[in-house]
Amino acid sequence: MITVKRALLSCADKTGLDAFAKTLKALGVELVASGGTAEFLVTQGVRSTTVEQFAGITEQLDGRVKTLHPKIHAGILARRDDPAHVAAVGAGGLIDLVVVNLYPFEETIATPGVTVEAAVEQIDIGGVALLRAAAKNFQHVAVVCQPQQYAQVAEALTSSQGRLDERLSRELAARAFTLASAYDQRIAGFLGSADGSQPSSASPADLPDSMSVTIARRQRLRYGENPHQRGAWYVPASTPAYGVGTLTQRQGKTLSYNNLLDLDAAVRCLLEFPEPTCAIVKHSSLCGLASAADGRSAYERAFACDAESAFGGIVGVNRPIDRALADALMETFLEVVAAPAASPEAEARFARKPNLRLIILEWPRSRPAGWEWRQVLGGWLLQEPDAAPEAAEALRVITTRAPTDAQRAQLLFAWRAAKHVRSNAVVLARESATVGIGQGQPSRVGSVRLALEKAGARSRGAVAASDGFFPFPDSVELLAKAGVAAIIQPGGSIRDEEVIAAANAAGLAMALTGVRHFRH
């Protein structure tokens, strides 16, 4: 057990510090505080000894040096079970509890227009040193690095009359090292690029030789992909929440591992569309997508693409859910509904299905920045997000017949959709809605057959998008026979001439993008 007789407090964030300090005082703990913390405690009616008084020093270099002093660190690092250590420091110099939280570096660099100079001044040196020293000596010294820990530590001290169990001290030490590591990684990321963000290109010069990522568990999951697999959800520990990480759950069963994967797929897809759009995802596969004048129309048209597969799926919309959309969503069984907001009338409607998960999230204003990670057995893969621009003027028409302006717009819609369909991906679309999706087939012509089967008669007059080139003309011939009017694809096959000839023979319009959008 650690008997806490003296505590050192140095906190940039004063949240809850007054109550915690008063608890320590009530237990007879002597308080030593750095300048700003000591001044705050005075305003709360709590007396403390200043660091200057305790160590016999004054702050130096405009406050850059405050707690970096041998007396302070010796008082923290001394082993209580080593008489020589205790004699060297003296009982009057031992520090049993370190309460430190760090300068707000992350908040500072999140400020628009922040300068490097301003950011550098918020890099904590003394605080990190205190955390590491106390955490190293956890068998004799306890460390508290976050205001959220005050209640737990105060309760433990109160119930044990000023003592702390070594097990708790070890847990606190681990958290302190985790926080310090994440703090350093955020600083390294900021200094490693011109504007403090991750590099936007993945040239060999930008790809790092080594990387560390610190994540924190947000919640345990009932299980992983299957009931016999354990699972949990983690988020970055030192960067602002983004995308799925911003969600709040308004109702329904606990989110599952598979729910989160599907939700991520829906959000990534919807980022491509500024207009009111609905995406329906099942088993990480897009089974319906549509843009329309309002949310209900977008959902109904997306659902019509493949109503059979949509059953039990996830629906994401990029506009607030109103009563009309909620009424439509209630007509079928869905696992999750996600949107940036929902009206009170819509939430009341959803409440009739208490197991339906209603998710509200902060809709990202742009596509994800930084790197994407993926694990393989024995290693990790790193890549840039697929953020290639989609512009009508970038299309290169290579057939005798050119697509009409209306067809060009639909080709771009289908092309953006194909980007979020499992490769090999073939998407049929008309009037800003998918009508047939073929995906996950080992051959492209197999995906064509699947898309045409889903579309049925709706393929006549539709456009088609293929995420990769056509290796043979057979796919084009099948699409033409079904009545497809125009095709968009990357090009680049050694049989491009045969493919183009097949399109010309059928009177199809075909445009090349020069960009491939595989999604494995």
Image (tube, rainbow, N blue to C red):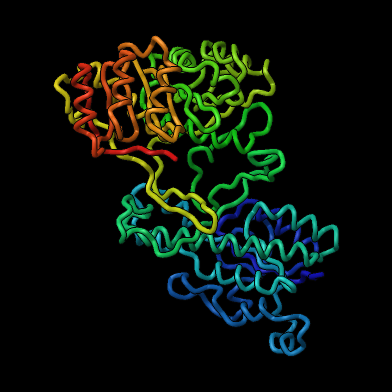
Q: Is residue 71 visible in the rendered structure shown here?
A: yes
Compare residues 304 and 300 and report the one nearer the observer: 304
Residue 158: image quadrant is bottom right
- How far across and how far down the image is residue 504, in percent? 18, 21
Residue 331: image quadrant is top right
Q: In the rendered image, which quarter contains the N terminus?
A: bottom right
- How far across and how far down the image is residue 207, in percent? 36, 58
The residue drawn where x is 49% and y is 49% is 374
The residue drawn where x is 77% and y is 69% is 4
Task: Reply above or below: 426 against 230.
Answer: above
- How far across and how far down the image is residue 420, in percent? 42, 33
Left or right of 42: which side holds 24?
right
The residue drawn where x is 39% and y is 15% is 292
Compare residues 135 and 399 and report the one nearer the observer: 399
- How far across and how far down the image is residue 192, in percent? 37, 61
Left or right of 441: which side holds 346?
right
Which residue is at the far right? 160
Compare residues 425 and 389 and report the one nearer the observer: 425
Left or right of 276: which side holds 501?
left
Which residue is at the far left? 400
Q: Is residue 290 visible in the rendered structure shown here?
A: no
Compare residues 394 and 137 and report the one nearer the observer: 394
- How many numbered callouts? 0
Residue 333: image quadrant is top right
